[in-house]
Amino acid sequence: MSKPTRSSFGSTMLEARQVRKRYKSGTATLEVLRGVDFELTRGGFTAVVGQSGSGKSTLLHLLGLLDAPDGGEVLLEGRRIDNLPAIERDRLRNTAIGMVFQAYHLLPELTAVENVLTPLLIRHGIWDWFRRRREARREAEELLDRFGLAGRLHHRPRQLSGGEMQRVAIARALITRPQVLLADEPTGNLDEESGAGIIEALGELNRDRGLSIVLVTHDAGIARQARSIVRLTAGRVETVAPAA
Amino acid sequence: MYKLLLCWRYLRTRWIALASVISVTLGVATMIVTNAVMAGFSNEMQTRIHGILSDLVFESHSLSGFQDPVWHMEEIKRAAGDQIAGMTPTVAVPAMLSFQVRNQWVTRQVMFIGIDPATHAQVSDFGQYLQHPANRQQLSFDLREGGYDTTDSQSPTETPTRPALEHAGWPHRRMRVERERLWKQRLESQADQAGPTRPVDQQVDAVLAATSEDEPPDDAAAADLPRQNPFQAARPEPQGRTMDPAKEQFTGIVPGIGLASFRNREGIDQFLTLPGDDVKITFPTAGTPPKAVSDTFTIVDFYESKMSEYDSNFVFVPIDALQRMRGMIDPQTGIPSVNSIQIRLKPGADLNEVRDRLRKVFPADLYAIATWRDKQGPLLSAVDMEMAVLNILLFLIIAVAGFGILAIFFMIVVEKTRDIGILKALGATATGIAGIFLGYGLFLGLVGAGAGLALGLGITWNINQIRQAVEWCTGARVFDPSIYYFFQIPTIVNPATISWIIVGAVAIAVGSSVLPAVRAARLHAVEALRHE
């Protein structure tokens, strides 16, 4: 979470150019994205809204390199990344992009702090890990502490509430010090109060740390917390507007 | 690093996978036990066979043998003297052994072997298999004044004692002669007058009761006896002069213990005849065509190699006596013939190399030269073959366990699809994901093989106690010692074999996790994340 310098502020962080995505099921082909342009500025906070099936989650997956577009390009800091070799994309997911999901997606066998450490465990081999484990663990504990989970370090996911699980997931996304955070309906499974807490935390990260964030949501109220809103309808960008 | 952590966590939370490992464990344990027991048997058999046979056997094709063993031995020494530790000539002919048990004649088909008492022990372990301690030092064909082992000298603690051998030797012979004399007296006096019991009859009964443990005097049976001396046949007419059987013996022989005894269900040896008894042997002469001749011999010891095939087949006799009786000594020159020369090589000598050297010197149409392995080749290779087939079959058990692991791993991959998606989203590579499952398979293989190793060694080291427990529970005999004459199941734990078994089992466990691992690695991240 290196603070972006003034001069770089405003330049493009993450960009999609005319991306297309089709899903085939049997003979039917479903065009989910029909040439979407998307831009996230450095330090930006963009909400992607739209109805179910409008393709907003698919866009997020393409931006997060979880899936490859059938057409168009995805660029990170002006460099095309969607056509990189698998191992390079894996590395980018592990270092540059943090992801948060609606269903939290924590590993049930691991404790909260271990879940937060997972990306670093993936990054480092056994040897490296033994050299860095103290530092990494301290960092993970600090992150959890910041999200008010100091007393929950060694709980398993099923012992945590939804809001707590989502905060663990955010901490996991942040431990890699990503350049961009992609959140897919992070409040979808939460009650209003917990959801508001999560959005507030994201807003804080964007404001205080300059973290570039893409937030997918169907809730217009939440979307208004972002700096700009992109509305997708039936696989196309309908409007791009600064948030009120 | 996450691979290790997740493997460990999965191992701790997925007990079902451990269940699949049980078959690996059992397979490994079975293989270890089977191999140890087979190796034990095979080794025991080989030592026995080798103990009986010398390293090299130099023999003639004809039953009449070849002349002048001394010249032959010198030639052999000239050809391969640097490798030879000892040599002894032998004569072996098929023969019939007859001895009397109570009033019946028992006849057995035997191999009648003439040996040189002075040198025979140098070429094989023959001496160790005798029952008299002095004979084990130096074999003598003279009957000993008692002192035969009542315990098995080769496994003193494991086999029951043989009290029958306590009185064997001269005491047994004198007692027998005395009994025969009294019998004769009694029968003669009965022939004189069938009247009331006379003092001599009481004396006979007293002696019979004192000398016979397993033959209580049975008046009814005695009365039925034909009016002839039943021992007449056992005591042949001395030729030319009368001999006193209480003080003299015939030519000594050493029959295999299996010829003279049988082992009952309790594992106790019951003797039909003892050192000190006389037996008759019928054998062919060396002429053409061979004629059957018979002679009487006195048992002086028993031979117990614990290979029932040999112990119930071999009868040893001094070679000079056999040569004389068969007419194998040239009447003009006095040079004897022998059937074969037994050769013991120096330790570390190459059996086959020496055999080939001798084969070059001696024409193959006159002499057969073979190593002990050649002679027992079919048996030894049959054992090796058996072991190989058994190992293949048992390895299939572990292979079946591999399919169990395959199925359970597929299940776990399906169950963990979402977790796999999460790991991919966090940047785990395809190889990394595959590595989790391969590592998991490796863990399970190691755990299974380790447990199998412990179980297998545990069973192997306690196999005789387990055998006893099973026999006690079921009442059935699991291991019949009368077949191979050892009371313990022999085992040899061969570290190389065990390493192969373990490596094989672990390889199968890892191998069967390859398919599930590849499947996991190929899962599509987005689809995996959506998996419920």
Image (tube, rainbow, N blue to C red):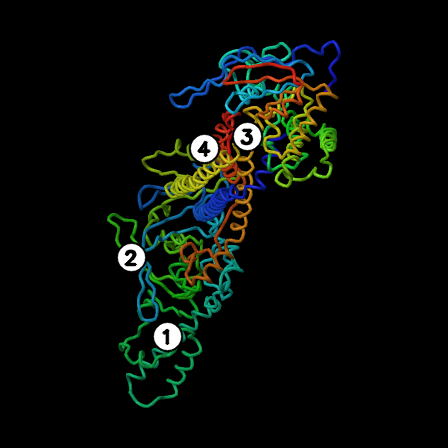
In the picture of the structure, the residue carrying the numbered disc 4 is B353
Residue B229 in the image: above or below residue B478: below
Dot 1, how many residues are within 10 Å of its Cα: few (below 14), some (14-19), or many (20+)? some
Q: Earlier in the sequence, mark 4 or mark 3?
A: 4
The first of marks 1 and 3 along the sequence is 1
* Tag 1 subunit: B
Give the crowd class for mark 4: few <14, some 14-19, many >=20 residues within 10 Å. few
Across and down, in percent, residue A155 comes to 67, 40
Image mark 4: chain = B
Q: Name which of mark 1 and mark 2 comes first in the sequence.
A: 1
Label for residue B180?
1
- Mark 1 vs mark 4: which is more N-terminal? 1
Going by the numbered disc 4, the residue's amino acid type is: Glu
Q: What residue did someone put label 2 on?
A: B293
Q: Nearer the viewer, mark 3 or mark 2?
A: 3
The first of marks 3 and 2 along the sequence is 2
Q: Secondary structure at mark 2?
A: strand
The Cα atoms of the two marked residues, 1 and 3, are separated by 95 Å
Residue designated by label 3: B420
Q: Label 3: chain?
A: B
Rendering coords of residue B488 (x, y %): 49, 55
The alpha-carbon separation of the residues under discs 4 and 3 comes to 64 Å
Image quarter (top left, top right, bottom left or bottom right) of the C terminus of chain A? top right
CA distance for labels 2 and 4: 41 Å
Q: Are marks 2 and 4 on the same chain?
A: yes
Quadrant holding the N terminus of chain A? top right
Q: Amino acid at mark 1?
A: Glu
